[in-house]
Image (cartoon, helix red, strand yellow):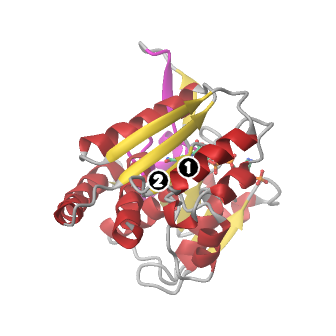
Amino acid sequence: MSKAKILSGKDTALSVYNELNKRIVLLADKGIRPGLCVILIGDDPASQIYVRTKTKKLKSLGLLSEAIFLSRDVSEKKIIKIINDLNNDTQYHGILVQLPLPDHINSQNIINAINPEKDVDGFHPENAGWLAIGKPRFIPCTPKGIMRILDDYDIDLSGKNIVVIGRSNIVGRPISILTSLNVKGANGTCTICHSRTKNLEHYTMNADVVITAIGIPNYLTGDMIKDEAVIIDVGINRVDADNDKGYQIIGDADWSSVIDKVSAITPVPGGVGPMTIAMLVENTIEAAENFG
Ligand code: NAP
């Protein structure tokens, strides 16, 4: 039987919500109810599920949580007008535009329109800049959640070799920064790999911790990692399955070939995903505390 520790993001998220509940009460004492507005453009089924999950979670904690649904052919100008209205609406402390956006819309223009003090996704260049200089304001939810899981399970990155596979602004890039910051729990030596990396195994074989965020099912196999490595699996991949739904969600790591080799691993589902939501709630509360 495998001796791997299963790093349950579900469990860590529960302890996060316990802490957050106390902060919600303190804010309520001051007459502040944290509020988040999510904008969804188009009808992508996965995005609809993500938005519903996020808004439901905030509501269940008693926070104000609204979603604005816009048709796929909406203009960039109209979205920016809606964002401007939300920037000036004091009941919303956080604004989130669900990505990806349709091709005719320039995502960067949309992100730039959000007031950085309401940018609970942490994607605005101002917030990305604060993170890059080691003074984070809003940290993107998925990387923030990864750091919290590692902390919760006492996995200290100091002096460790970290390999991040994927360089997106949402996951790969910010987690590469966070793991290498000069702060408690971090101080790792981080290498960031991507689709142009030659001989990826050369890097993963030397990694104490592999963080994979590429979106290819079963990509990271047991022969690519060293014994006792830690795997943080960010991938969410829908594959055909012989069950009622006809599909199942799996990660980027090939569970059957890595599980007997790793010392710890996040499962998919139940690993990084629940922490992404928990960190969105935390960032919304932080926005209300700091700028409410
Ligand atoms: P993305 O923007 O598509 O980025 C994927 C990254 O993987 C890119 O940097 C790409 O390299 C790299 N890549 C692709 N194929 C590769 C290969 N064969 N070898 C090495 N690198 C390769 O995706 P993302 O938004 O970061 O998301 C990544 C995955 O995480 C997806 O499955 C997504 O659904 C999941 N995700 C999960 C959560 C969660 O809460 N659990 C949150 C966000 C995302 P290039 O830059 O060279 O193209």
Residue under label 1: 85
Identified by mark 1, the residue type is Asp
**Image position, residue 269 (x, y; %):** 42, 39
Q: Is residue 261 visible?
A: no
Relative placement, left or right, of 131 versus 194 is left
Q: Are marks 2 and 1 in contact (CB under 8 Å)?
A: yes
* Residue at mark 2 to residue at mark 1: CA–CA distance: 6 Å
Relative placement, left or right, of 200 versus 86 is right
Relative placement, left or right, of 58 versus 261 is left
Above or below for 55 versus 110: above
273 and 268: which is toward the camera: 273
Q: Secondary structure at mark 2?
A: loop
- The numbered dot on residue 89 is 2
Residue at 48% from the left image edge and 79% from the top image edge: 186
Above or below for 223 versus 239: below
**Image position, residue 44 (x, y; %):** 61, 27
What stretch of residues is rendered in magenta?
245-272
**Image position, residue 30 (x, y; %):** 21, 66
